[in-house]
Image (spheres, grey):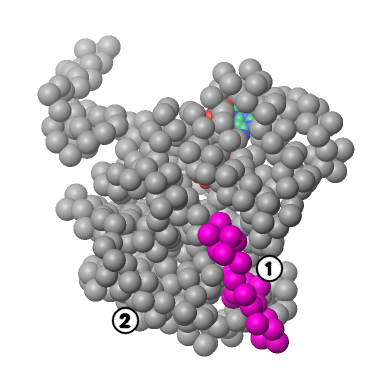
Amino acid sequence: MKLADNKATLSFSNGSPSIEMPVYSGNIGPDVIDIRKLYGQSGMFTYDPGFLSTASCQSGITYIDGDKGELLYRGYPIEQLANHGDYLDTCYLLLKGELPDAKQSTDFHKLVNNHTMVNEQMQFFLRGFRRDAHPMAVLTGLVGALSAFYHDSTDITNPEHREISAIRLIAKMPTLVAMAYKYGVGQPFQYPQNNLSYSGNFLRMMFGVPCEEYKVNPVLERALDRIFILHADHEQNASTSTVRLCGSSGTNPFAAIAAGVACLWGPAHGGANEACLKMLDDIQKMGGISKVGEFMEQVKDKNSGVKLMGFGHRVYKNYDPRAKLMQETCNEVLAELGLENDPLFKLAKQVEKIALEDDYFVSRKLYPNVDFYSGIVQRAIGIPVNLFTGVFALARTVGWIAQLNEMIGDPEYKIGRPRQLFTGSPRRDIKG
Ligand code: CMC
């Protein structure tokens, strides 16, 4: 970051002296006012719950222009990566800053493939869960438990430990997600098969059974790879900020990523794809397309507490570029599986059409986000609804690690410690 030409001056109406603060510019995007010395100079904090105007860090990984609807990973538009790249190359890009050349790509694929198995003991840990446990509850536990299995990569200050834990996490997440699924349906776990692609391997671990040969469908393989690319990183969202804050205490990478998984679970974040499909199911049960108008009235009624899931975003005030790509993938997958007339897909299109024309959504700049179509694609592939957020966590793991490692390498990095405006009781004494 570099000092901008101008400075910010904060003045007070009570006659206290005004304060000058430096302004920094990034390469693109809004400048920031550096308020780090504000408390020392004025005795005041800033107040910004929800981080509406606060940049919590400097980062060179992902850039979003919410008004344009643009998403760049290390400068590359998401459309180009989704159309020409593969997920592991995207992981390489996010972690190392550049796309790999042919040899680097082959080596990286091999390296990740070498770490797909999990310690055999892991399945006994998994077996402690109820069969009907939510996969995100299971995953939060499993990812956290990795730190108990890989003692040789838990020192966050050691670059080699960071490197190997990154590879382990990326390689093992598909295995863990598939294990959480198999456990729930009571089928034997499928060991990874390293001659398959990253997404092909995941499909086989999910849907293969020991008594039959599993053939990977290339359209579904590609669709899944695209889902992974689209979810790989999204700058300082809630789960990434959670990972950074958790990691800022110096905890091990597995623990920090487990915190990210836990945060992602919420319906306002990664849980939205699950919530979106449930919403479409509910509208279907109400009577389907003919009831969309009635449903929209509930959404617009602030007292109803009903939201249009898969719509709206803190940063995008335009169409989420990932939603467009996901809609394309949705068309491809449904055509491949002969599900073009899938009633839920038709319903989703109708909901989208009505919302995009309705003044409530238009005036608030509410557009479909990535989760609006990702649930339909995943359901068509055969992924159960309660595993959608687990698939999102799998894909986002690389983003969390890249951001965590960036933070550790930042000379300005400090333990995260927000302050507060205290509104509770002042000091008082117990009577008697
Ligand atoms: N349905 C109906 N109204 C909405 C919606 C929605 N989905 N989203 C926002 N609004 C309204 C909101 O009530 C508010 O109205 P008003 O100005 O009259 O009070 C206005 O739009 C601004 O919304 P906000 O709550 O201030 O926006 P936010 O930035 O705090 O929330 C959000 C962003 C994503 C949490 C929210 O849009 C939402 O809950 N959407 C549904 C859940 C969802 O799809 N989440 C996935 C996000 S993308 C995947 C990810 O990155 O995890």
Give the residue type at disc 1.
Ala
Left/right placement of residue 280 relative to residue 176 reads right
Quadrant in the rendering for residue 77: top left
Relative to 280, does residue 339 appear above or below in the rendering?
A: below
SS for callout 1: loop
Relative to 74, does residue 302 appear above or below in the rendering?
A: above
Please count the marks in the image. Answer: 2
Pointer 2: what residue? 152
Pointer 1: what residue? 133
Residue 409 in view, yes or no: yes
Relative to 195, does residue 284 appear above or below in the rendering?
A: above
x 65%, y 82%: residue:
213
Give the residue type at disc 2.
Asp
Q: Estimate the x, y position of residue 53 in percent, counting from the top left.
A: 37, 31
x 74%, y 40%: residue:
346
Left/right placement of residue 284 relative to residue 349 reads right
**First to last magenta residue range:** 203-223
